[in-house]
Amino acid sequence: MQPAYARARQQKRAVYDEETIHAILDSNMVGHVGFIADDRPMVIPMAYARIGQVIYLHGASKTRITRLSDVPLCMEVTRLTGIVAARSGFHHSVNYESAVIHGQARKVTGDELGQSLDAILDHLLPGRSAEVRPMNAQERKATGVIALEIEHASAKIRTGPPVDDEEDHALPIWAGVIPVTTALGEAVRDGYCGEDIATAPSITAARRRFA
């Protein structure tokens, strides 16, 4: 079934094409996943990766969410890019990009499990799966992945300065945008990592992805 890339309710901020939504997913690090468990709503931050129209979500195998299958899920990612300071409290806002995904949970097993774990690792640090040792049987048993098949998706984006009332523009009040940036800092090696070991190429690649 082809996913529906739907319009957001506030049309002037809606972005609903597949390319834009995929770009938002691919350039963020953590998704917040919502589901119902024991008749209660739950939201959990999770590492993820997208392959085509499937989002893979990583967690410990004993957690509640990684045991879900054939139940509806939703996932949201947001990047805050600025605080919008206006001349009135009412017109303050934030600049951001966000995507909301709806679909069905599916438990990942077999060869797909290894592929999805590599994808999740490489989403945070591109190419890292080729730099590390293979996962052993005990680690694989302790790790769970669920697939979220994209059925519906929408995005909202706000950019630009405050939208003040025309009569407020003459007020002697500072207004504008305070940028919010997310960046990776300088890598800090652990106590077992010798000075002769070069910084992994995946770290440089991650700086480019999340710049």
Image: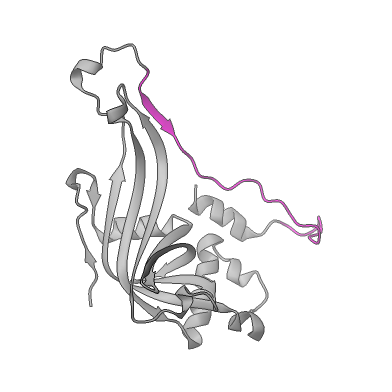
SS assignment for the magenta stretch, majority:
loop
Q: In this rendering, does residue 136 appear at all?
A: no
Looking at the figure, which quarter contains the N terminus? Answer: bottom left
Residue 176, percent from left and from top: 36, 25
Residue 92 vertical placement versus 152 (above, below): above
Asked whether residue 27 appears in the rendered view, the answer is: yes
* Residue stretch in magenta: 174-198
Which residue reaches farthest bottom? 110
Residue located at (55% from left, 56% from top): 205
The answer to whether residue 197 is magenta is yes
Q: Quadrant of residue 130?
A: bottom right
- At horizontal 36% and vertical 37% (from top left) the residue drawn is 94
Of 199 and 167, nearer the camera is 167
Query: Residue sitting at 34 percent across and 51 percent down?
Result: 98
Q: Residue 143 lies in magenta, yes or no?
A: no
User: Could you tell me residue 209's position as x and y percent?
Assistant: 49, 54
| Above or below 177: residue 129 | below
Q: Nearer the viewer, residue 180 or 36?
A: 36
